[in-house]
Image (cartoon, rainbow, N blue to C red):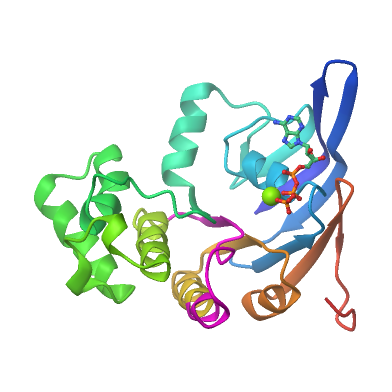
Amino acid sequence: MIHADQLTRTYQIGTQRIDALARMTLTIHDGERTAIIGRSGSGKSTLLNLLAGLDRPSSGTLCVNEQRLDQISRNEMAEYRLRTIGVIFQSFQLVPQRTALQNVELPLILSGVANYGRKKIATEWLTRVGLYDRRDHLPSQLSGGEQQRVAIARALVNRPKVILADEPTGNLDTQTASEIMSLLMSLCQQLGTTSVIVTHDGHVAKTCSQRQFRMTNGALAEVTADEVL
Ligand SMILES: Nc1ncnc2c1ncn2[C@@H]1O[C@H](COP(=O)(O)OP(=O)(O)OP(=O)(O)O)[C@@H](O)[C@H]1O
Ligand SMILES: [Mg+2]
């Protein structure tokens, strides 16, 4: 479960104070597929970075999979990032000097999986995302959609509890975007993975999730069934 209560993230730049998240509340149950929409600057990435363990709250509580992210140590946070969550970015963020297969292997290396098992698991995942025949390509030798498929395989290879994605289709054309989202959603469904997808695209939000939330000035509200996105 993901639970946030009175969650606040304040940035202080000189004398200017920005409440990127302001006493926000959120509950997402295990296995739920959710989307967050909202205007630019509303605080979506700020929330995702907190959930990803890349940033810490200024105040309030944030609990993911029974771990208090507002309280855990640096080492526990590294472990959390490796095992509990998988992250997908708009700009793919693959390691440029490594092949598709090696990129998918990275989380397995970090979790100490031995060489042979690692290659096998990474290859299985590349096959699952339809890229077996591109396994030896570098990211620069792949299309945007293919790079995002590699990133999806990399995010899921350690079987995380939660997938977090910030505008995962922002750099892709409409057709590829919809293929990528259905791939990601069907994998999350098969594995029972909770997902939180940030998007500014109402159509993507509706099709990729069971529940949608709207972020407005650092506060979150669930979108009702009849609301037009
Ligand atoms: N590192 C930072 N330092 C200071 N202010 C920041 C920082 N990061 C974000 N902000 C501010 O916090 C607010 C929320 O930013 P955030 O990146 O979460 O928005 P967003 O909803 O993801 O927007 P977009 O749709 O454009 O990606 C904005 O007003 C932004 O200017
Ligand atoms: Mg953002």
Q: Residue at x 81, y 59 (%)?
A: 38
- In the rendered image, the quadrant that contains the C terminus is bottom right
Residue 161, given in percent of the width and then of the height, sits at 50, 55
* Residue 195 vertical placement versus 127 (above, below): above
**In front: 79, or 13?**
13
Q: Is residue 192 magenta?
A: no
> Would you identify the image quadrant in which residue 150 lies?
bottom left
Residue 21, given in percent of the width and then of the height, sits at 82, 40
**In front: 169, or 158?**
169
Q: Is residue 169 magenta?
A: yes
In the rendered image, the residue lying farthest to the top is: 14
Residue 96, given in percent of the width and then of the height, sits at 30, 46
* Residue 24 vertical placement versus 158 (above, below): above
Q: Which residues are magenta?
A: 160-179
Q: Is residue 154 left or right of residue 16?
A: left
Q: Quadrant of ligand 1?
A: top right
Q: Residue at x 54, y 56 (%)?
A: 90
Q: Residue at x 86, y 31 (%)?
A: 18
Q: How many marks?
A: 0
- In the rendered image, the quadrant that contains the N terminus is bottom right
